[in-house]
Structure formats: structure tokens, C-alpha cells
Amino acid sequence: MQWFEYARPGTVGEAVRLLSEHGEKACVLAGGTDILVQLRGGFRTAEWVIDVKEIPALDEIAWDEASGLTIGAAAPCYRIYENEDVKKHYPGLIDAASLIGGTQIQGRASLGGNLCNAAPSADAVPIMIALEASCCIAGPNGERTVAVEDFCTAPGKNVLAAGELLVSLHFPAPKANSGAHYLRFIPRNEMDIAVAGAGVSVVLANGNFASARVALASVAPTPLFVKQAGDALAGQPVNDESIQRAADIAKQAAKPIDDMRGTVRYRKHLCEVLTRRALHVAVERARRNN
Amino acid sequence: MSEQSYEPNMVLSTKEFDVVGKRPLRHDGVDKVTGRAIYGADVSMAGLMHGAVLRSPHAHARIKSIDTSKAEAHPEVRAVVTSTDFVDPGDKTVDLGEGLTRLAYIRNNVLARDKVLYRGHAVAAVAAASLHDALEALELIEVEYDLLPPVLTAPDAMKEDAPLLHENLRMMEFGRPTDKVSNVSDHFRHEKGDIEQGFAEADLIVEREFDTSTVHQGYIEPHNTTALWNNDDRIHIWTSTQGPFTIRDTTAAILDKPVSQVRVTPTEIGGGFGGKIPVYIDPVAALLSKKSGHPVKIVMSRAEVLEGTGPTPGSHLKIKMGVKSDGTMMAAQAWLAYEAGAYPGAMVVPGGMCVFAAYDIPNVTIDGYDVVVNKPSTAAYRAPGATNAAFATESVVNEIAEKLGIDPLDLRLKNASKEGTRRADGPKFPRIGCVEVIEAMKNHPHYSAPLDGPNRGRGVAIGFWFNAGLPSACNIAVNPDGTITLVEGSPDIGGTRTSVAMQAAEVLGLPAEKVSPSVVDTDSVGFTAVTGGSRVTFSTGLAAIEAARDVRDQMIRRAARIWGVEEDGVDFEKGVFHLKNGTENRMTFSELAEQIATTGDPIVGRAGVNPPGVGGSFSGNIADVEVDPETGKVTILRFTAFQDAGKAIHPSYVEGQMQGGSVQGIGWALNEEYFMNAEGKMMNSSLLDYRMPTSLDLPMIDTVIIEVANPGHPFGARGVGEANIVPPPAALANAINNAVDVAMNRLPMNPVAVMEAIWGKNGATD
């Protein structure tokens, strides 16, 4: 681990200035649950560590019936799953926020950090994709918005350019008769990395799926949005056959690798199982929401 | 049967005492729960430097050169050492309590000399003003390697054309040296009866092959040491170890110093399970201290613990057993190949002693192979070698029971070893509790409880492990306030301060609270062998009993002097001295203790023992699981552990051992493994990815203590630390088999493995 300089800007502008100034030599510290491990383990080096937790916009959680939910990129998981609005309107998000790491990790870890770390196994990302979340990014040239499914580009890589900072995540207000769920598979029951995960959302209308979205964890170089699985459900009746078809499409879309956490065959198989099971839960939630 | 209608922790007591068998608070409890106990990483002193170790990135390579000049030039570096700083031990052998070992193997494991034999093998070390500087300096050391092909499993290493780890390693066969240069350091065979005849007489023969992965003990406290090489050439080491005298003797041998010049203070220990017996960083810190003139502390990281210390062997086993149709075992054959890691000494010898120990079988052949591979040099792990063996044997026994339609516990009872049964490796069992353990399992409500629901299954298995004697010393001083101070040399891993103190208390008729036990350094107590082999409560307990008897006899003489009678005129009972002649004269222990200073010399009891009469302990499990047939994940619904403790000196600590051993066995069974890539790199060297069970992965483990008194101990105690880890993998394999009808032949039985077995059964292809 190298010595580094530490800065704690109080505004987005100041953070962007520091990040622009130090470019590749800087890294952003939110909860630190990934960055500190990477710096200590020598997997990453940084001359500047920019702590963004003090910036109000990165720490807020705001809900509005018309515009939806905004979560600051550095807001820790425990504040998300203890927030009454989030609990009521986005139970699928609670699924992910409450299973990342363990209790201590959840006191620090953030959705923004999970996304910027860009691990294929990121537990918060598939459900954010399923919920059509978008990223609000500030940079030297102003703000821009990127859909979550377009944010990660490779393992550990994302779309942020030099000087850019992920400020917040925005979730549209849930539609009537909608439901979502994130289901992860790990060999233990806590403190583990997803062997595979499935985040899904559904909107029901008149006994049919009006629309659906499916995204997978740990089975591709980035969290994987399987658009065709959700599209296959649109207009279909809500039954085991439709759900099975979508699950099979998810399985086909998965491009996993063999590693210490699982084999290609096993992970593809899990995609089918998890997508199917997650869709059933999402349908149950959607029915309760009508 | 509801969950509440049975006792979760039963003690099937056969004999009662005043102190022994009760549950007093542990003497070190307050320090442990308030964080005041001093562990090795807490050790600090003036001028302390921090050491760090450079480790090989390669599993097998020849060291061409090591250039330390840049590290030495680092302004904060005080010393750099490599193996050339050690005296060359040549062919010298040492006996460090486990038979003769080549000193060069130990020395070369501590710092590699010509070759690195596993990834994580220590190559050099530095001491610097801060750990950060030391780690920075490691990157300045330049090592040139010639890469060699790694060999990672016993079957690969045994091939004729396998790359050799040691060009001078000649195989021992049947106890004799051979000329064969090989990765097999030893091939032994135990034979009893006529194996061919035995199989010929069998009505059913079951033969299966098994593999088990390398697993680590997983003690939470990493290895640590602080060494001070003083100007008078005396070396003081503070370290977390199971054997301070082993550290002393090994360090002295490696540094070529007399043992009297090395003093080892064992700090509190955060787990060992056998893994904190070998020496790793102590001689390195000592050399760094000598070169720098400062005390030097080294604390391993978790990755260093996993990659650079001794796990337990991976193994490859073939078991063949033949039975009559009534279940009578006629013949049993075992082929055991255990991976020693980089240097000879896999735990295959005890594996061979335990593989059929539970059964009285007339015809037996056991072949064992000790095989070196490019993995860390293995160390003991709780009943070393026995868990691997029992996984195989017990799985075959369960299959036989199923095929014959006999209850698996009845099959075991029919063939159970008992007093007088001769094991294939020679010894006859003394009084043992194999039958009693199986009967307790049969009688337990768990065994007859209904297990409803799909994909659920129940499994059983039993296991055996020895009890070591070995030397222990103990001193007891009597204080004027009626208490005693007890000094011992056995690091306390499992509550042994208290279980040893209780035995002295029982002899002297004192409550356990009136004993103040201390574990002291190697200059302050007589030689005491390692905390291992489940021996401390037995052997150090015996030393405490003998020392307490010495105190008692001296106190009787003192009472006789005070009363002006012959010493045989004084009786001692339940903490009270009184005259035999019926007069009113009596003194409590406290009253007499108060008078010691004014009536003669101080009273100090002492004992050194090396006891025979070791017990050995049988254990058993009943396990209920539910398997998710779509993911292969196993959930343990209920788990009951049974063990013969002889006499549970402190039942809470026996239960703790049973639960702890069960948890480690469950971890070994379900998820733990060294996941190696083709180059011999461990891919999961963190506790995130080396998956030991967490509290959410376990049910409460119920315990049943069986007490079949060990005639070799005054209170009947047997060693209980280890046998409990032996049955869980086989019991869980049996439960998984009953749940989803797949035969599991490989550990770990992780979700991928179970799913593959289910696919195999269904003929699924995709």
C-alpha cells in the first residue's frame, strides 16, 4: 500500500475540480468497502483519495410521488433499507441493499460505490437495471445522465471520464401493478460474492405481463441486462410457461466463466433457476400492489 | 416430537465428584471478554521494529539469485535476511516430539534455500521502522527464478514421470529405505488376517474411491511473533503457539543454539487446531533482531496464513469392504494417498491407524502413501488424517447398510470395536466407548424424530481419535489466604486453565475459584509437550493432580507437626484436615494455609508426568439436511454430536469442543477447499472466498456427552478435543444421499458438486 493524500470536498464542484486535477492518480472514496481493500491489497494504487461522503447531494435520499426516488451515490445501504419510502415503493431495492456483505459492511457500502466498482457480481446493479434507474453524473463539462445498464463497460471499468463523479441514482416512480425482486445465489448465507444473481421487475395488466425487465449478476464481464427476456414476457399471460420461457432466455444470454465460485454450466443453470424464482416473487409483489 | 421435548445438552454421567463435572466460570473469562487478554499482536516494547516476509509467487521454481541490496539501502530498513543467514544443517535430524525430521526441511520451509516448493513459500524478510516501510522494502528485493512445472495432487505426483520436488528424497517402503527417488516419501502397509479369504467369504462387497480437498484450520488469530536477540546472545520470543517448548527447541535447532539460550513466552492464543505447532516466523524474527539490534515483530496477513502455513492434506482414498448378508464385516481394504505438501509428513500414518478403528474386522489391509506436492507443507488439523479416512469408510459402511436393509447404527453396533479389539496397525484397544456412543445415538430422540418434507434426509457416522500422553509439568504454591497458584506450560486453547485447575481443586477439596492458574514461559516451568493430541486435560491434568497430591501430603505433615502426632495420624477429606483418633482437632485447608509461614518452610507441590493410560475417544453425529434440488445447496436442519469424554471435567468446555469440532467438520464437508489454479496459485486466499461456515449457516448443535471412564485417569478423563471433527463429512454425505439419492465421493460437497451429482443421476446434459 502506498502513501496517499486525502481530500474531503464539501461540494460537487470541488470534488470535480480535484478529480480533474489529479486524473488517473485520484480515486473516489464513498463507503470505502471496496477501495480500501483494493488499496491495502495492492490491487490498485492512488496518490489522491477523494472522500465524497460529506457532499450533501451524494448523501441524500429523496422520494417524490411524481418524479420518483433519488439516492445519493454515497448513501449507505442501511439508510436505504431503513427508509420508509424506499421500503414502501421499492422493495426490490431493499432486497439488494440488505444482502450486500454483512451488517457492518451495510453501514458503509453505497449503491454508487457498488456501481462504480463495476464488478460483474455487484449485487445492487441488476435490480437497479430492472427498476430502470439512471445515473446522474457531474463533470468538468456539466451534468449528464446514463442508464445504469450502460454504466459498466468491463470488469472494474465504467463510463466515467476523467474528472467525472457519480452524484446520484434516480429511480422512476413505480407503475401501478408492478413488482420487483433481486435473488442472489451464494453457497453460504451471508458474507459471500454472488455465484449468480437475477434482478427482475414486472408490470401486470389484465392478467398479462404489460412489461418486464431482467438483469443478471456474475455471468458476464459486466452486470448483464437481458432485454430480450423481459420483452418476451410483454403481452404474455402470467403463468409458469411464460415465466419459464423468460428464464430460459436469461440462461441463454448468460456468458459466465469457470472460476472458484462456479462453473459455466452451473452458472447458466442458476440464471434459469434464479430468473424463474425472482419472476414469481415479483409477480406476487405486483399482485399485492394493485 | 417437538423441538423442546429433549435436552439440547445431555451428560450421561456415571460418576459424580465435588468439583470435577461442575461448570465453574473460567479463570481467564473476564480478560477475554473485556479485551484485556494479551495476544501476540498486542506485544509491544521500546525500539520495536516491524518485520515482513517476501513470499514466492510461484508454486515450483529454482531460486537463481536473490538481490537484497536495494532493500538494504532503503532508509527505514534495519535488516534483511535470507536462508543464507541460517547455519547449514546438513543431514542433521531432530526429534521435536513427532519422530525424527530432517532439520533442513524445517529450515528450508522457514526460508527457502535452493527451491521454492509452493506459492507463498517464504524467501526473504525485512525489518523496518514501520510495517508500511517493511512492505515497501519487500518490493525492492529482486529474486530470479527458473520456473519448474508444479505438481498439485497426490495421483499426479505419484506418476513415474512426475516432476520431482526433492532430488534427494528416497522412498521409504515398509519401514525400510529404498533407492527410489520419488515424490512418495513413505509407503507403509498394515495387515491383519487374510484379506483374499475375507473377501471370498463376503456376501456383499462395496468398493469406492474418494477425494478430499486441502483445507485449513482457519484459526481466527493469524500467526505472530516478537523476538529479541539480546546482547548476551539470549533470545526471547513472544508468540502465539500451541507448543512453547516446541518453538524453543525448533528455533534453537535452526539457529544452532543451545535450548537454554531461547526463552519462549506463549501469549494468549486465538485458535490453533494443530496449525500452531510448526515454526514459521520465529527464527526469522530472531535473525532480524540479531541483525538489527532491535526487537522485531512479525504478524502474518490472512493470505499469508492460508498460503504460507500448514493446512491439512488433500487426500485420495480407495475403500473396499466385504460383509456377510447379516452385516458381519469380513474384510476391509484401504488405499490412502495423502498430500504432504512441500515436505514429507502428511498425516497419512494416523489416517491409517483410524481408517477402520471403529470396527472389529478379522481381515484388513491398509496401504498408506505420504506424497509431496507443490502446496504448503501440511500441519496437524484436529484429529489429523482421521476425518479424510472416516469420510471414506463411513460412506462405504452406510452404503452397505442401505444395500443389506440393515439400520446403519445396528450395522455399526454389530461390528463395533471394544476392549480387546486389535487394530490392523497393531495395538489392542483398552476400555473404549464405541458401543456406548452408538447406543446413545440410537436412543436419542433425534434418531427417531420424523423428518417430513421433500428433499430432506438424515445421515449418521462415527469417528475415532486418540489421546496423547506426553510430558507435562506443574507447580502449585499454597498462599496464606487459602488459595493456590498453579503454574503450567500448556497454552490454553479450549478452557484448559480451568479444567486443569479443577482437577487440582478436586484433590485439595477446594472450589475451583480458589485456584489461580497461569500458563508461563519456558524458563518458568518444566518441559511440557504441545497442546495437541487432546492431551492437556488428560496429561497436564494428571500433572496438576500429582502436584496437588504433593501439596496435600506436605500439608498433612504440617498438620501432624502442629498437632504433635505422626503423619499417619492425620486424615484429609473434602478440604479438612483432622486427627484420626477421634479428637476434636480439625483444620480447614485455609486455616492450615494461614499457619504455613509460621510453622515451617513454604509449601510448594510439583509434578512432572509422562503418563501411559491414554483414553482415545469415539464420537458420532446424527445430521438432518434439506437439499435444494435446483441449486444443490445443502441446509442443515438439525445436528446432534455424541462423544465419549470418559469423564467431562468441565462439561461446558467439552460441549464447546464438540460444537467447535462439528462446525469445522461441517465446513470441511460443505464448502472449504484450497481452490488451486493450474499453476498452483490458491485463488481463494481470503476468508471471503475460503468459505468457513458463519453462524447463519449452522443450526444449534446439540450435544450428548457419554462417560465411559478411562481407567488410566483418576477421574476417568479422555481427551475430547479432536474426535468430534471426524464424523461430520460422512454424516452429511449420508444425509445428502438420503435426501436426493446421490452418492457423494468428493469433499467439499458444495452446491456445484451436489448439482453435478444430481445431473449425473438424472442423465442431464447441457
Image (cartoon, grey):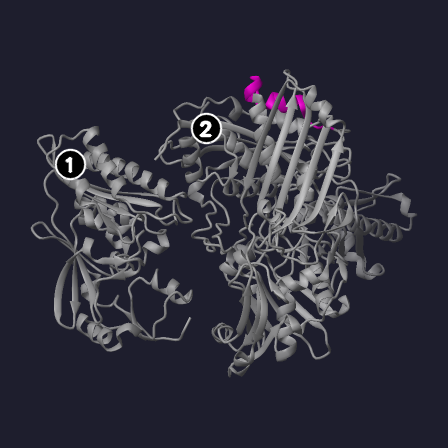
Between B660 and B763, the one nearer to me in the picture: B763
Query: Is A81 situated left or right of B310 in this image?
Result: left
Q: What residue did someone put label 2 on?
A: B3
Q: Amino acid at mark 2?
A: Glu
Q: Is residue B577 left or right of residue B264?
A: right
Residue A227: image x %, image y %? 17, 45
Res. A263 image quadrant: top left
Q: Is residue B310 visible?
A: yes
Magenta residues, start to end: B402-418
Query: Residue at the location (40% across, 37% down)?
Result: B633
The chain letter for the residue carrying disc 1 is A
Are the residues at dot 2 and dot 1 in contact (C-beta closer than 8 Å)? no
Q: Nearer the viewer, residue B621 or A61?
A: B621
Q: Do the dots labelled 2 and 1 sit on one chain?
A: no
Q: Does the magenta-highlighted stretch encompass residue B512?
A: no
Q: Which residue does the image show at 29% across and 48% down from the upper left?
A: A217
